[in-house]
Image: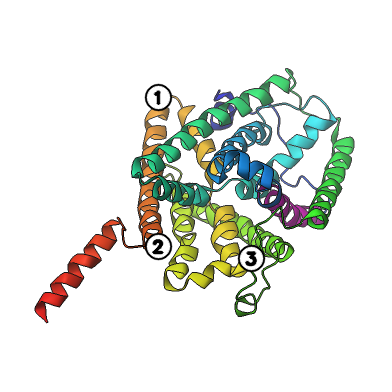
Amino acid sequence: MAAAAGAMLDGEAKYNKKSSTYRTRAQSLLFIILLPIAATVTTDVWFQSAIFSSAFGYDLVLAFTNVSGAFFDGFLSAWESGSAVPSGAKTEALNLLADDVRAFYLSTYTSWAGLVGVAASLAHAKSSISIGIIYIIMSLVCAFVAHGLGSDFAQYISSADTITNKPYMTKAHKLVQQFMMSLAVYISLSYIYLGEENIEESDGEGGDKFWVTATPRNQLATSSLFAVLGAYLGHLLANFISKTLKHPPIPMETLICNWFFGLLGLSLNLMKIRDQTWGESLTLRGFAINFCGAASLFARHASDNQRLYAKKRVGKRQASINVAANFLSALVVFWVAFEMEEWLQPGEKRKGVMLKIVKILRKARDKTR
């Protein structure tokens, strides 16, 4: 399960590629833009369609998205690390695409911030904090297993021979260009097809107040813009932290990004506590859901755990520490998100700890008057 991670860790990559995998910078720039938009179209249009939402519910749809994203991350990590050897033009194209797809598509496709927020909403809806915590644990466990299965699948279809030349490179580049065109067509057709049944439409109130009129197509365009920014800036921040912190005991870039953007993702509920109409703001929704979701690193967390677990001697211990640290940071964000859900709950029966503290302080203040 962790063969690819082990090969990358121990420097046993069978196949190396050049640092520049595209012929022009324009191609690389297009992927930075197209990949997050394609991921947003997939999750916000097709996965939130009436069929998926009514049949499974958003909590299960997000769980499937995160776990499947971890599988594809494991699959692509084997090609990126060189532990999976291309056996033809198609697998050579996978080798070329792996880095960008992991960094920009899968970071947008999956969402650590969304995981914690949905867990809090689920706990609030079921009136049980334990259900939300179990949701987080099961998502992380399934993602770890899925990542290993994806890596194993890449090893299965790769070439058994170690090669040093690149006999499929010309055709592979053509496949990459065709893939780029396919993404553009997919995004365009999805935007044209988009109707009221695909993305929940606003009731029309407050559209002018929040700068962007609340229509499904405007929502998709706004979400895509924030997803591109989130994936790129999250990638830059993670790389900066990774280069700044030398030899940390666990991957601190993943921990910091997930905690930081998980908290920022609560900005929508925070503003709704102040004024419920903020829920109609496409700009705020794009920032809280798409920007923070794309900047957080769910798939990378699963990859980190596999990589650490494959280490000799101290691997299991480091992986356990990494899981515990990320889980505890998730619990902090989960608690804050749950408290906000309780504040937003209509009616008099509210349960949050902060609500109880506020009531106690109010009673104490009233007594002193």
Q: Are marks 1 and 3 in contact (CB under 8 Å)?
A: no
Could you say which is closer to the camera, residue 225 or residue 282?
282
Residue at 72%, 63% in the rendered image:
221
Stretch in magenta: 25-43
Asked if residue 151 lies left or right of residue 258, the reply is right
Point out residue 222 in the picture as x, y percentages from the top left corner. 67, 65
Q: Is residue 28 magenta?
A: yes
Taking 61 as reference, is 334 above or below it? below
What kind of residue is marked 1?
Answer: Arg
The answer to whether marks 3 and 2 mark residues whose Cβ atoms lie closer than 8 Å is no
For badge 3, the amino acid type reads Ser
Q: Could you tell me residue 349's position as x and y percent? A: 31, 58
Q: Which residue is mark 1?
A: 313
Say which label, 3 or 2, has the lower sequence index.
3
In the foreground, 87 or 352: 352
Residue on which disc 3 sits: 202
The residue under the point 57% across, 23% down is 3
Q: Residues within 10 Å of mark 2 (few under 14, many from 20)?
A: few
Measure the alpha-carbon separation of dots 1 and 3.
Answer: 55 Å
Q: Is residue 76 above or below residue 39?
A: above
Residue 209, picture quadrant: bottom right
The residue lying furthest to the top in this view is 160
- Residue 346 got which mark? 2
